[in-house]
Image: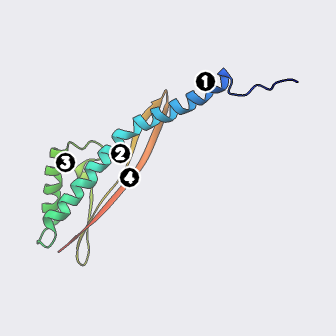
Amino acid sequence: MQQRQRGMTFLGLVIVLAILGLGLYAGIRLVPLYLDYTKVARALEQVRDEYSAVEASKHILRKSLERHWDVEDIKGIDWQDIEIEKTGEGFDVTAAYRAEAPFIANVSLVADFEKTVAIQQ
């Protein structure tokens, strides 16, 4: 009786490890982008908490954003690129941006982020 071999060949193992390695490398390259996004989200929420139920203007909100950007050392988006829109109840502050991380050779990873907070007055 002939016995069948079971298991993975060396080539199959190398291919699986290469795929897992590329996935891990992509994750490592994307982590700084997501960490920067968490800083942006935290800064927007802190501005919301500072100025909710307080009379504020676009200029005051921009100055507060500038301070938070300096403290948090945010690189993904500039504080001047944050959109502040007047609404009936207050302001909507939106950070929408695209972050890019180099991957391999001329291939890059791109992530789109968007965070909006409503400042009620």
The answer to which of marks 3 and 1 sits earlier in the sequence is 1
Q: Which residue is mark 3?
A: 69
Which is nearer the N-term, disc 4 or disc 2? 2
Instruction: Measuring from the top left, give residue 9's x and y in whole percent.
Output: 68, 23
Q: Residues within 10 Å of mark 4 (few under 14, many from 20)?
A: some
Badge 2 marks a residue whose secondary structure is: helix
Query: Disc 4 or disc 2, which is closer to the eye?
Result: 2
Q: Residues within 10 Å of mark 1 (few under 14, many from 20)?
A: few
**Residue marked by disc 4:** 113
Kind of residue at disc 1: Val
Residue closest to the eye, 112 or 62: 112
Q: Amino acid at mark 2?
A: Tyr
Residue beneath disc 1: 14
Instruction: Say whether residue 6 is left or right of residue 75.
Output: right
* Marks 1, 2: nearer the viewer: 1
Task: Determine contact: label 1, label 2, CB under 8 Å.
Answer: no
Point out the residue furthest to the bottom here.
88
**Residue 34: numbered disc:** 2
As shown in the figure, which amino acid type bears the numbered disc 3? Trp
